[in-house]
Image (cartoon, rainbow, N blue to C red):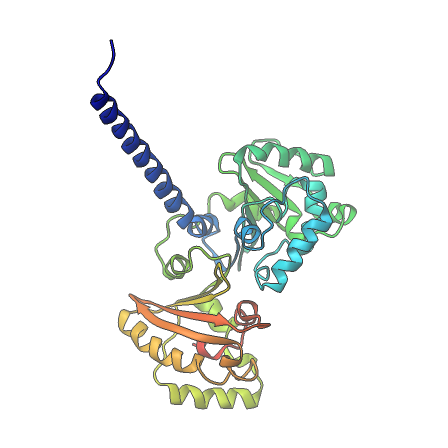
Amino acid sequence: MSVPRRRLFIIGTVLLLVAAAVVTWFVVMREDDEAGRLAGAVALAPESSTRLGWTDWAGLREELDDSDLDAASSTREVDGFLTAGFDADLTSTSALVSSAPVLHAQFGFSPATIDWELFAQGEEGAIILMGLPDPSAAGDVEDALEEVGYQQPNEDDGVWIGGPDLLATIGNLSQELAFITVDRERGVIAASDESETLESWRDEERGDADDALAEVTDDVEGALAASIYDGDYACVALAMTEADDVDRTRAAELLDEAGEIHPMRAFAIAARPGGDVRVAMAFETEDQARTNADTRARLAAGPAPGQGGAFPDRFTLGDVTADGTVVRMELEPLPASYVMSDLANGPVLFATC
């Protein structure tokens, strides 16, 4: 029995609408998942972390047209990728760059293949977290660790013991790779120079902490690279106290001229796709944020004592806005300037406390 054409047309239209709805759902879900990659990584960092360095290696490979890099790529190709990343001021947040050739050749993972990296530091130690693009690759990483000489743990998700002596026999490797644990379920590799840091890591994660660090992290979501500091660390690392006497005197004058400022509760500077840089600063109240949006914009548009010259020699200042308790500052780096790496370290006048 034949089906009327009108009914076929209606059925076909319905199927197309259903297919379109499924595609839309998939895209939205993918975007939602991608939007929280940085926040998801920060949630894995130890709660005691005061300084975080984020590198979106998958994003860098796409940004630098090296998406075809894989485990079969040569170390020369990996070196070329890292050189391009340095030139683009996108690799200063990573703890893996100097170790990359050895990792790529012998460990089954490297900046050429991992999804992302988060280097977390605090008074209780340092840890490198690395996300695998496919959790099923965790087994290959463990096989490689055994092959290069790490001592296998007695239990799943235990700590693979290498130590400084083993690293010296393998090649040029950061000491933070002395001990490694692999979280198979989440597809995350964690490394540290202290085995105790890894043994306690899963019990001390930040999780869904709602604090100033989380606020600035959310504001720089989507970054290719980011330095994120809590208030105490930022007020030391970016302080004008690191400048010489002449620059400190000049800074004090500029601060008086700019107006009222308040201490930051957290700070982030992030390199974004396309080359722009975003700064986020969290304050105690919305009133403080509105006040500091004005005063710090004046500071960011003027001289840069301690850095040398003036900030307009490094970047064009875009919008400076206050959203709740967070001040957002958009910067457009000028050619041959290293805004991301330079301004992640002090002294930085507009980030003074």
| 219, 171: nearer the viewer | 219
**Residue at image point 55% right, 84% down:** 309
Whole-percent x and y of residue 24? Answer: 33, 40
Q: Residue at x 47, y 80 (%)?
A: 349
Front-most of residues 164 and 111? 111
Asked whether the viewer can see residue 153, the reply is: no
- Horizontal side of residue 32 vs 272, given as left or right: left
Residue 82: image x %, image y %? 65, 56
Residue 328's spot in the image, x, y percent?
A: 38, 68
98 with respect to 338 (left or right): right
Left or right, 102 with reference to 134: right
Residue 110, given in percent of the width and then of the height, sits at 63, 46
Q: Quadrant of the C terminus?
A: bottom left
Residue projecting furthest to the top: 1
Instruction: Please say if 304 is above or below 114.
Output: below
Q: Residue at x 70, y 51 (%)?
A: 173
Relative side of 197 to 47, left or right: right
Frontmost residue, 248 versus 224: 224
Q: From the image, which quarter does the N terminus lie in?
A: top left
* Marker count (numbered): 0
Residue 347 visible to an observer of this rendering: yes
Residue 284, image quadrant? bottom left
Q: Is residue 224 above or below residue 115?
A: below
